[in-house]
C-alpha cells in the first residue's frame, strides 16, 4: 500500500504518518519490529530493495517510511528501478505499507514525483493560512473541552507564529494549566514566545538610559505591523528573566549555569548575564512595575500604543 505526503507543513504530515503507524501497530504488528525507517537522502538502491524484500518477523507485512528521498543526490541512478517496483504494487492492504514523506515541495519535474503524485494516498500539506491557523487552534482546544477567545488567539499567534510544532507544544501547556477558558493573561504567563533579537537591543538601550534609541526601536516594530501586545509581552518576559538572574547573581557566575538554573537557551542566558550588569535590583523592580501598569493601560485604551510606550520610557 503506497502513501506520499509532502509540503511545508511537516507537523500535520507527521501527524498523519503517526496515525498510520499507530494503526499498523494496532492491527498488524503490536511489537513494532516490522516498522522500518529509511533516511531517503542517503539510501542506495540496495538499501531500499533489501528493506522491501526481507521477510517480516511474526507479521504478514512491514511498514517502511522513506523520508526525503527527493534530496538523494544519486536518486537518478536508480529512479527507474524504483518506479518499476512501485508500478508493480497492487496497492492493497495485503502488501507492505510504503510511506514516502518529503519536507517541502519536491521537484515536480522528476519521474518519481510524477509517479507518486498519481497514487490514491498522495497529499500536499501546505502552510495554513491565517484563517485556517485560527480554526486549527480553536479545534485543538475544543478537542480537550477548552475554549479560547479571539483576543487570546491573536496574542498566541503573535508570540508563536505559524510554527505548528511549537504551537502544539504551547497549546498542550495551556490545556494542562487552564481550567475552562484560556485567556490572554494565561498566555502571557505560560507561552514561550519567539525570541526577537531586537528585544535585546531594546533592553540594552533602556539599561544604558538611551531613551531615544529605545523609542526608535519600538516605533520601528510598530510601523512594521508587529502587534504592540507582542512587543510588551516580550519586554516583560525579558525583565522577568533579568530579575530572576539578578537574584541568582551571587551564586551563578557563568551563562552556562544560568542557562541550567532558568532553563533558557544558551544565547538568551549569555545576553541576560550581560544585561544584569546594567541594572540594580531597585531599577529592575521599578521598570517591571511600569511595564505591568502599561499592560493595564493597553486594555482600556485603543490606538495610543506609541504614546503609551513613549510615556513609559520617559518615566524610567
Image (spheres, rainbow, N blue to C red):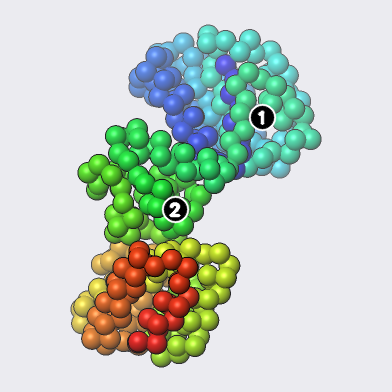
Please determine whether, in this image, residue 44 is positioned above or below residue 115.
Answer: below
Q: Position of residue 146 (x, y in %)?
A: 30, 39
Label 1 vs label 2, nearer the camera: 2
Q: Is residue 273 left or right of residue 78?
A: left
Q: Position of residue 36 (x, y in %)?
A: 49, 28
Asked which secondary structure carries label 2, the reply is helix
**In this orientation, does residue 97 appear?**
yes
Q: Is residue 294 left or right of residue 24?
A: left
Asked which secondary structure carries label 1, the reply is helix
List the residue tagged with mark 2. Answer: 154
Residue 205 figure quarter: bottom left
Q: Position of residue 145 (x, y in %)?
A: 29, 34
Residue 125 figure quarter: top right
Q: Is residue 8 left or right of residue 265?
A: right
Q: Position of residue 136 (x, y in %)?
A: 46, 38
Q: Residue at x 49, y 29 (%)?
A: 17
Q: Residue at x 71, y 35 (%)?
A: 75
Disc 1 to disc 2, C-alpha distance: 48 Å
Which residue is outermost to the bottom? 209
* Residue nearer the viewer, 286 or 191: 286
* Residue nearer the viewer, 245 or 155: 155
Query: How many residues crowd mark 1 within 10 Å: few (<14), some (14–19), many (20+)?
Result: some
**In this orientation, does residue 234 appear?**
no
Q: Are the two marked residues, 1 and 2, in contact with CB atoms closer than 8 angstroms?
A: no
Residue 113 figure quarter: top right
Query: How many residues crowd mark 2 within 10 Å: few (<14), some (14–19), many (20+)?
Result: some
List the residue tagged with mark 1. Answer: 45
* Residue nearer the viewer, 123 or 67: 123
Amino acid at each position: 500500500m503506497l502513501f506520499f505526503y509532502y509540503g511545508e507543513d511537516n507537523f500535520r504530515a507527521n501527524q498523519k504518518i503517526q496515525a498510520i503507524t499507530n494503526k499498523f501497530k494496532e492491527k498488524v504488528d503490536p511489537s513494532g519490529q516490522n516498522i522500518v525507517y529509511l533516511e531517503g537522502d542517503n539510501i542506495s538502491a540496495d538499501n531500499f530493495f533489501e528493506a522491501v524484500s526481507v521477510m517480516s518477523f511474526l507479521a504478514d507485512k512491514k511498514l517502511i517510511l522513506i523520508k526525503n528521498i527527493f534530496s538523494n543526490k544519486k536518486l537518478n541512478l536508480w529512479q527507474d528501478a524504483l518506479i518499476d517496483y512501485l508500478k508493480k504494487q497492487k496497492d492493497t492492504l495485503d502488501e507492505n505499507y510504503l510511506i514516502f514523506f518529503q519536507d517541502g515541495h519536491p521537484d515536480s519535474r522528476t519521474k518519481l514525483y510524477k509517479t507518486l503524485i498519481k497514487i490514491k494516498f498522495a497529499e500536499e500539506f501546505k502552510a495554513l493560512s491565517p484563517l485556517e491557523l485560527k480554526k486549527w487552534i480553536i479545534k485543538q482546544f475544543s478537542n480537550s473541552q477548552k475554549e479560547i477567545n479571539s483576543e487570546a488567539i491573536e496574542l498566541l499567534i503573535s508570540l508563536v507564529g505559524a510554527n505548528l510544532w511549537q504551537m502544539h507544544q504551547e497549546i498542550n501547556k495551556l490545556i494542562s494549566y487552564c481550567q475552562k477558558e484560556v485567556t490572554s493573561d494565561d498566555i502571557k504567563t505560560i507561552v514561550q514566545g519567539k525570541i526577537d533579537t531586537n528585544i535585546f537591543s531594546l533592553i540594552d538601550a533602556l539599561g544604558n538610559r538611551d531613551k531615544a534609541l529605545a523609542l526608535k526601536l519600538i516605533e520601528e516594530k510598530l510601523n512594521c505591523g508587529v502587534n504592540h501586545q507582542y512587543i510588551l509581552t516580550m519586554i516583560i518576559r525579558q525583565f522577568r528573566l533579568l530579575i530572576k538572574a539578578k537574584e541568582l547573581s551571587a551564586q551563578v557566575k557563568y551563562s552556562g549555569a544560568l542557562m541550567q538554573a532558568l532553563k533558557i537557551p544558551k544565547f538568551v542566558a549569555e545576553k541576560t548575564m550581560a544585561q544584569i550588569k546594567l541594572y540594580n535590583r531597585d531599577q529592575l523592580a521599578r521598570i517591571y512595575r511600569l511595564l505591568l501598569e502599561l499592560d493595564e493601560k493597553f486594555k482600556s485604551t485603543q490606538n495610543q500604543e506609541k504614546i503609551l510606550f513613549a510615556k513609559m520610557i520617559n518615566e524610567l
